[in-house]
């Protein structure tokens, strides 16, 4: 009946026209937090304009392709995006940027959040 769809699409409920449903994947509680900045392209724009980091370092930190970062530097990609400072948003520290500028093989690490969020308990709904 749905032979034109791959098996993983059938299992997730997308082939039936739904947005998922039973078997659609892990619930939001089980999804891991991302290790990328909140606005990766805006962060990459700021890092290209304000630091001496390599394209590979910026691409690795922002989870972008190095050619996309090169396009940002050339002005071909993200032309209308205003850069977001990762230091003011507490995603990076000045020391981390300075360390990465000295060593081209160093990979930037996302700063630990200052606020810890409690994991919400799943309540059973009405029966």
Image: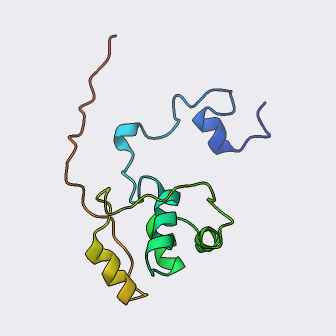
Residue 15 or residue 32, whichever sits in front? 32
For the point 61% across and 54% down, the residue is 80
- 28 versus 105 height, above or below: above
Horizontal relation, residue 79 to residue 35: left or right? right
For the point 44% across and 68% down, the residue is 61
Name the colouring of the figure. rainbow
Position in image of residue 74 (x %, y %): 65, 73
For the point 58% across and 36% down, the residue is 12
Horizontal relation, residue 6 to residue 112: left or right? right
Q: Which residue lies furthest to the top in this view?
A: 127
- 113 versus 58 height, above or below: above
- 30 versus 35 height, above or below: above
In which quadrant is the C terminus drawn?
top left
For the point 80% across and 40% down, the residue is 4
Position in image of residue 107 (x %, y %): 39, 78
In which quadrant is the N terminus drawn?
top right
How many numbered callouts? 0
Horizontal relation, residue 88 to residue 84: left or right? left
Position in image of residue 81 (x %, y %): 56, 55
Position in image of residue 121 (x %, y %): 23, 32
Q: Which quadrant holds residue 53? A: bottom left
Residue 99 or residue 123, whichever sits in front? 99
Residue 95 or residue 34, whichever sits in front? 95
């Amino acid at each position: 009946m749905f032979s034109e769809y791959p098996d993983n699409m059938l299992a997730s409920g997308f082939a039936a026209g739904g947005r998922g449903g039973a078997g659609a994947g892990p619930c939001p509680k089980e999804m891991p937090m991302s290790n990328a900045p909140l606005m990766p392209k805006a962060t990459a724009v700021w890092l290209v304009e304000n630091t001496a980091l390599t394209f590979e370092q910026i691409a690795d930190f922002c989870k972008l392709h190095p050619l996309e970062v090169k396009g940002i530097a050339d002005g071909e990609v993200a032309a209308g995006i205003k850069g977001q400072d990762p230091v003011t948003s507490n995603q990076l520290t000045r020391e981390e940027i300075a360390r990465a500028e000295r060593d081209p093989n160093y990979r930037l690490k996302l700063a630990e959040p200052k606020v810890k969020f409690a994991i919400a308990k799943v309540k059973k709904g009405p029966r």
